Image (cartoon, helix red, strand yellow):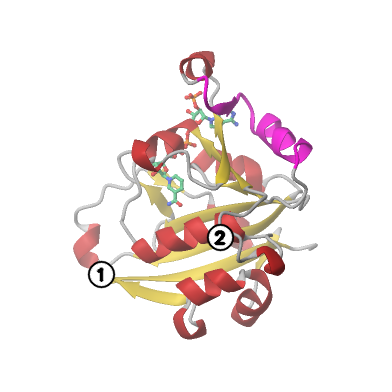
């Protein structure tokens, strides 16, 4: 098991917004594929990449509202072990089939303590869960999609959840150079399916977004 945890997030470039009215502020098919593939295949040895689904599922940890934002037909997120955070004991009682935890520490301890040994752990939101995860010394990579929202889309969106973006100030994390992202960090499958021609910038429906990777300074 990779001893670190990692974050995946897509945020608006101008204000770090990540949510609107309980949902994502946009629908970007390319970024959704990136999210699916990075959380499913990161850390899987290249020799096992042809195995679909992977024999050793990664973990995705999310707050209760993020869980509820996923359409019921798409949850739990397939081929990954879904862990949901809620402080409300009724949520666990009413959802006995889910793996629910009252603290982020408890969810991470569960993931780290369980088999199989090659799984990776991803924190996938929302805002306070990201903030708590970023403060942990075992937080390694942040997979950050920087979304430029076009003017026409801005007019229809009321942003109400925001990424804690202080991690970008350079004190604890540094941005990884694009060449290294493509050659060593992203699984080959992600590069092949999401980064046509080795390009980390994507245009879709007037949106332009860039896959960026940040890593804890001492790693
Ligand atoms: N753009 C992106 O990449 C991205 C990613 C994720 C989510 N989102 C968006 O963000 C919004 C949801 O995020 P959010 O920040 O509002 O909510 P959230 O973090 O998903 O959920 C908040 C809830 O999670 C539980 N929780 C949070 N931290 C906890 C902890 N440390 N221990 C135990 N329980 C904890 C609590 O549930 P109880 O109230 O049940 O106690 C809390 O009310 C949606 O709009 C979603 O679409 C966007």
Secondary structure state at the residue bearing disc 2:
helix
Q: Is residue 31 above or below residue 9?
A: below
x, y percent for residue 198: 52, 83
Q: Which residues are magenta?
A: 96-115
Residue 208 screen position, x and y as percent: 35, 72
Closer to the eye: label 2 or 1: 2
Depth check: 40 or 139 in front? 40
* x and y, in percent, of residue 109 in the image: 74, 34
Instruction: Return the residue at label 2.
Output: 38
Label drawn at residue 193: none
Q: Residue at x 39, y 41 (%)?
A: 70
Residues 73 and 123: in front is: 73
Q: Residue at x 54, y 15 (%)?
A: 89
Q: Residue furthest front?
A: 51
Count of number-bearing discs? 2
The relative height of residue 131 versus residue 96 in the rendered view (above or below) is: below
């Amino acid at each position: 098991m990779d001893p670190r945890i990692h974050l995946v997030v897509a945020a608006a470039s101008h204000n770090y917004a990540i949510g609107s009215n309980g949902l994502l502020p946009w629908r970007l098919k390319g970024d959704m594929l990136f999210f699916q593939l990075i959380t499913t295949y990161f850390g899987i040895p290249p020799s096992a990449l042809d195995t679909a689904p992977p024999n050793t599922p990664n973990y995705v940890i999310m707050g209760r509202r993020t869980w509820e934002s996923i359409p019921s037909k798409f949850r739990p997120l397939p081929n990954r072990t879904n862990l949901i955070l809620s402080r409300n004991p009724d949520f666990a009682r009413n959802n006995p089939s889910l793996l629910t935890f009252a603290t982020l520490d408890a969810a991470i301890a569960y993931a780290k303590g369980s088999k199989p040994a090659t799984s990776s752990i991803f924190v996938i939101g929302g805002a306070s869960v990201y903030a708590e995860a970023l403060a942990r010394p075992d937080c390694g990579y942040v997979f950050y999609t920087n979304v430029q929202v076009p003017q026409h889309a801005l007019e229809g969106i009321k942003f109400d959840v925001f990424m804690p973006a202080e991690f970008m100030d350079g004190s604890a994390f540094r941005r990884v150079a694009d060449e290294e992202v493509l050659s060593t960090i992203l699984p080959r499958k992600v590069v092949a399916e999401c980064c046509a021609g080795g390009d980390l910038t994507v245009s879709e429906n007037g949106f332009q977004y860039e896959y960026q990777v940040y890593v804890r300074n001492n790693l």
